[in-house]
Amino acid sequence: MLSVHLTLVTLQLRSTFRTSREARDSSDSLIVAVSDGAFTGLGEAAAHLYYRKTIAGMSANVANCRAFLAEVGEFHPEELWPELLRLTGGDLFALCALDNALWDLWAQRQGKPLYICWGLSTQNNVASDVTIGIGSLEEMVGKLDDYPGWPIYKIKLATADDISGMRAIRAHTDAVLRVDANGAWSAETGMVHAEALAALDVEFIEQPLKADDWAGMKTMYASSPLPLIADESCVREEDVERCSELFHGINIKLMKCGGLTPARRMITRARELNLSVMVGCMTESSVGMSAIAHLLPLLDAVDMDGALLISNDPADGVRVEQGVCLYPERSGLGVVLV
């Protein structure tokens, strides 16, 4: 018998975070705890305007799963996922919180970290980037100094000064630079920017065009001097195959796809299609970051800076210090509420 408990937290950002779509100082997040009486697993889902996800809606959809989970004894998360998908009405954000909590609980029952239960080693984990939101040139360069010694910075772009800003950032650091336009450019602008960014030794461009601008992506993909990574264009499992002909890699978000269960399948399919694989985050606490950490051995790139950008983390789990993921000595996801 499994019980479900919900906690609403408002995560306060350390500074205003701007992308091409919005500016935020805080973000509401739903923490889902699934308990068998001996162990408790944790998962997280964030409210999100772009994907039309609210705390009230996600809470209701999680609540629809309570009766089903109350009858569950021994389980494997992959076996529960299809029924939870049905019961949540296809709400992949709510399902992500449940799925991650169930993986946490499942691994805790085995007394091991989840990545060990999966037969993975963290010896060759890639380093995480830290994200610099849109701001004035002075603000963006200044934010680099807030994270000194970081090996990788991901820069949000969406203004008329994108390239001049990137030149100033490159002059300030020799670190690896990635850019993320969140769909702000046209194909014509994207190609011009790609040439300039390649000259600045940028590693890749994430989501240059709108999510459904498939014709524009075909144009960019054919001649871009930099790898192109799908984010908003790759939400569900079925998006991976389509992206294989228009992008060089995909950025998986656990909330968008429905948790660790489908994320692992997406990674497998991406490898079959010779796509590079990244996992990214939204505004999340250490609950969400701790789930991402167990996929690290499978990834080419990762953006797991969510907990670094908030001032009131409600949990203690994995930490990221100058890009390096540090795992606590706990089983499951390794995360607890504080």
Image (cartoon, rainbow, N blue to C red):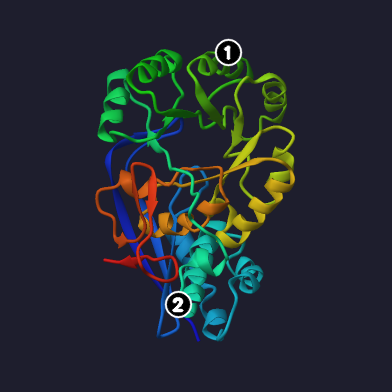
Above or below, comparing residue 29 to residue 335 in the picture:
above
Determine the image quadrant of residue 211: top right
Q: Secondary structure at mark 1?
A: helix
From the top left corner, tell me how far across and down residue 191 is, in percent.
61, 16
Identity of the residue drawn at 48% across and 60% down: 57
Above or below, comparing residue 226 to residue 115 in the picture:
above
Inspect the image, locate mark 2, and give the three-letter code of the amino acid beneath it: Gly
Q: Secondary structure at mark 2?
A: loop
Identity of the residue drawn at 48% across and 53% down: 123
Q: Nearer the viewer, residue 267 or 206?
A: 267
Identity of the residue drawn at 66% across and 34% down: 248
Q: Residues within 10 Å of mark 2 (few under 14, many from 20)?
A: few
Above or below, comparing residue 189 to residue 204 in the picture:
above
The residue carrying mark 1 is 192
Q: Nearer the viewer, residue 38 or 299?
A: 299
In the drawing, does residue 260 fall left or right of residue 23? right
Inspect the image, locate mark 1, and give the three-letter code of the amino acid beneath it: Val
The residue carrying mark 2 is 111
Q: CA distance from mark 2 to mark 1?
A: 52 Å
Q: Quadrant of the C terminus?
A: bottom left
Q: How many marks?
A: 2
